[in-house]
Image: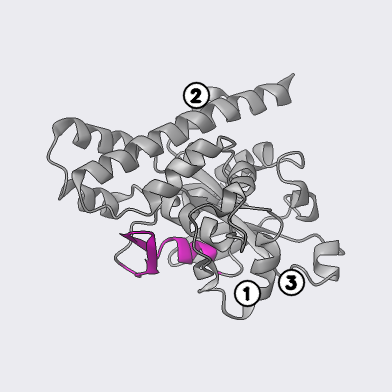
Amino acid sequence: MKNIELTKVISDEQQWDGELIEFDPDSSPEAWSFFKKIYTEDQLPFISEFDTEKLKLTKNNEARRLAIGLKPGSYLAEEGKFWPKFRIAGDCDFNFDEKKVEQFESILKNSENIKLLSDCAEMHHTVLNFSFMPITGRMNNLKGSLHAFGKKEIHILPGKSYDRLDTFIAALKNYYCKESKESKESKDCIKDDIVLKFAGKNEEPLVSYLDKFNNVYEYCSRIYFIKDTEFVDKLIESGNQPLSSEENIKEYMDNAMSYWRIRKKVFEERLSNRQN
């Protein structure tokens, strides 16, 4: 994959088994072609337990999604840690779809910020904004329903949230919060299992998935390719704030642009190493 394609807008209509199908771009054939190049065993050790060659076609509203499941005989299923039908698909990290753009436009007044919003919208369906997300346990739906109210209060507010990566990461920090306040990952966090609220009967395998990561920093490193803990902290701080002012939306957009720049550099290096 050439570097220029990292910022290419991924179309929703793509070929699959000789048929033109409407996909969610973040879980489309093109997205999976990219995922298989970056989510290697050195990046995500348990990926070897998933069959990335046999993608499973699922439906999300009117669009289709491709997901991966465990290989037959995987130790994760045999030990009962992940259930045999555990699935992982793609997800848009920062959501700048048409609805979100309209919501932000109603608040923004500064012309430079409006231009920045347009730039963010152009990144919405690029691979720089796509990452793994479990379908099992509905953590993808949970992320899209989290709403930050300020003062580190994050609640579920379906239909009125912004599907924010930073708020999701803030919620993950609280999930991994330890009783001891001595460790970095437990500083200023409040133990909260809100990330499990949509899991229902699939809570057990979702917990097993989350337990594959020691803390929010390892999760961001392995799933989002963000190894800079200070930047993760910056996202957590932003994710706890509501997007109710121009200042906060500007900070949110700046963080999104920084996120994509970091990932672009990482992906270019990883793809270059694969070719050498």
What separation in Å lies between label 2 and label 1 (alpha carbons)?
40 Å
> Viewer-proximal residue, 151 or 213?
151
Disc 2 or 1, which lies upstream in sequence? 2
Instruction: Indicate the amino acid at tag 2.
Output: Ile
* SS label for mark 3: loop
Identify the residue shown where x is 54% and y is 24%. 3
> Viewer-proximal residue, 50 or 269?
269
Neighbourhood count class around disc 2 (C-alpha, 10 Å): few under 14, some 14–19, many 20 upward: few
What residue would you read off at disc 3? 83
Task: Please name which of the two marks, 2 or 1, marks the residue nearer to the observer.
Answer: 1
Disc 2 or 3, which lies upstream in sequence? 2
Task: Please name which of the two marks, 1 or 3, marks the residue nearer to the observer.
Answer: 1
> Can you see residue 93?
yes
Identify the residue shown where x is 46% and y is 36%. 259
Does the magenta portion include 147?
A: yes
Number of the label disc, if any, that sits on residue 203: 1
Identify the residue shown where x is 53% and y is 58%. 172
* SS label for mark 2: helix
Instruction: Indicate the amino acid at tag 3.
Output: Trp
> Viewer-proximal residue, 37 or 140?
140
Task: Please name which of the two marks, 2 or 3, marks the residue nearer to the observer.
Answer: 3
Against 136, residue 25 (above or below) is above
Identify the residue shown where x is 67% and y is 36%. 37
Neighbourhood count class around disc 1 (C-alpha, 10 Å): few under 14, some 14–19, many 20 upward: some
What separation in Å lies between label 1 and label 3 (alpha carbons)?
11 Å
Tell me the magenta residue range: 138-159
Does the magenta portion include 50?
A: no
Q: Do the residues labelled 2 and 1 touch (CB within 8 Å)?
A: no
Whole-percent x, y for residue 103 in the image:
22, 53
What residue would you read off at disc 2? 4
